[in-house]
Image (cartoon, coloured by chain):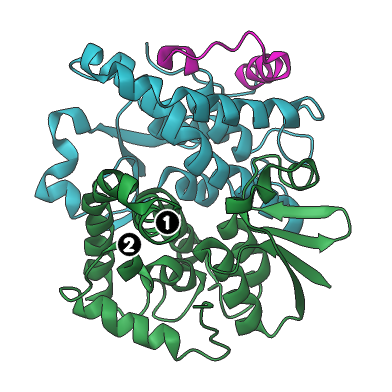
Chain colours: A green, B cyan
Amino acid sequence: MLRVHGMSDSGNCHKVRMALEALGRPYAWTEIDPRRGDTRRPEFLAINPNGKVPVLEIEPGVYLAESNAILWYLADGTPLLPDGDLPRARVLQWLFFEQYSHEPYIAVARYLRKFHPDPAAQRALADSKMDGGYRALEVMEGQLSKAAFFVAGRYSIADLALYAYTHVAGDGGFDLARFPALRGWLKRVGEQPGYVSMPA
Amino acid sequence: MLRVHGMSDSGNCHKVRMALEALGRPYAWTEIDPRRGDTRRPEFLAINPNGKVPVLEIEPGVYLAESNAILWYLADGTPLLPDGDLPRARVLQWLFFEQYSHEPYIAVARYLRKFHPDPAAQRALADSKMDGGYRALEVMEGQLSKAAFFVAGRYSIADLALYAYTHVAGDGGFDLARFPALRGWLKRVGEQPGYVSMPA
């Protein structure tokens, strides 16, 4: 059986749970908390030398890291990943956008404001993430003003990956009021079969 | 004919040139310089609302952004992308590693020290990128101590993507002396058919 090594309130890890639930795949979950130092222990570095969650254990001794690579692996051949060279490349375009232009602002601001042991000391750093985060949200709003989902007019891992931190962007201080298309899309994603919410 | 909208001395753009040359695909190139504000002009934002190079123009009016999504699109079905669900997911694992754990340190330090209009003013910021960059190089060294290339024992877009900024890491102040496996790999990549060097 598949096993996720992850932290339940991490958006990157929650993506994997969302995909497994949407696909109805059975899985086990081992809770790994980077804030406790779990990802720096030798036994974890043996499964991911980059020291990050999530890691998918495909079978004993076979591990795959990087949340969006895991999504691709799980979704390929299912309705969560469209057919066709260009639609598939577009899914990847949005997955790379998510990791480079979205997560480093929106997820990091959330971490600093909500999970850091001393959020007050991190306020200037968290504030420095806002402009980049709003730029990413504007790019998303532009796309969602033209289409119900990011690629090929239907729900895919591009939506799932972008949803993970966008739906908790408020934790980082982002106000979604001026992004109506994005708010409509959040609602649509929340209505997908097998939807599972992030633990509070 | 394919057209790349890119900046020749950007590693992210050079990846696309490397792939096109390795595959023997004809292409045109439009030079776009973000340092001159080219990526903020309305005509560029119309082809990539995220305002970043490279963009691949597949046919008139059809544009694909994100360097590693472009690599996947070009390489799928060629020897630059291995067969098999797990090897392909491993290629993606390294492509996401490159964009999240490597480029934001190694490429950014290079930009600040070599291309910024006032490198002295950016020195503290550039210095702050060194630890993360060395961590990425250590992860690469670990993998390359076990295998000649990143995935499936042969040259793929995982190597190509990681090569782009690693082979000019010295520009950012990184010393590769203590990474012998990595240096051997750089040499092997430089010997691949169709190899093209970055403009000086």
Disc 1 marks a residue whose amino acid type is Tyr
Q: How many discs mark residues in the rendered view?
A: 2
Question: Which mark, residue A193?
Answer: none
Instruction: Check if residue A111 falls in the magenta segment.
Output: no
Question: Which residue lies at the image location 56% right of the left edge and 24% below the top edge?
Answer: B134
Instruction: Check if residue B189 falls in the magenta segment.
Output: yes
Most foreground residue, A171 or B100:
A171
Q: Is residue B95 above or below residue B173?
A: below
Residue B25 location (% of width, % of height): 49, 37
Residue B139 visible (yes or no): yes
Mark closest to the chain's N terminus, 1 or 2:
1
Position of residue A138 in the picture relative to residue A38 (left or right): left
Question: Which residue lies at the image location 32% right of the left edge and 20% below the top edge?
Answer: B124
User: What kind of element bears circle 1?
Assistant: helix
Q: Is residue B78 above or below residue A58?
A: above
Residue B195 location (% of width, % of height): 56, 21
Q: Main secondary structure of the magenta part?
A: helix
Query: What is the chain letter for disc 2?
Result: A
Residue B150 location (% of width, % of height): 71, 35
- Circles 1 and 2: CB distance less than 8 Å? yes
What is the distance, in whole Å, between disc 1 and disc 2 at their CAs? 7 Å
Question: Which mark, residue A111?
Answer: 1
- Residue B145 appears in which quarter of the rendering? top right
Position of residue B184 in the picture relative to residue A139 (left or right): right
Question: Which residue lies at the image location 38% right of the left edge and 74% below the top edge?
Answer: A167
Disc 2 marks a residue whose amino acid type is Gly
User: Alpha-carbon neighbours of circle 1 within 10 Å: few (<14), some, or many (≥20)?
Assistant: some
User: Alpha-carbon neighbours of circle 2 within 10 Å: few (<14), some, or many (≥20)?
Assistant: many
- Dot 1 and dot 2 within a common chain: yes
Query: What is the chain letter for disc 1?
Result: A
Q: Which residues are magenta?
A: B168-191
The residue where tag 2 is placed is: A172
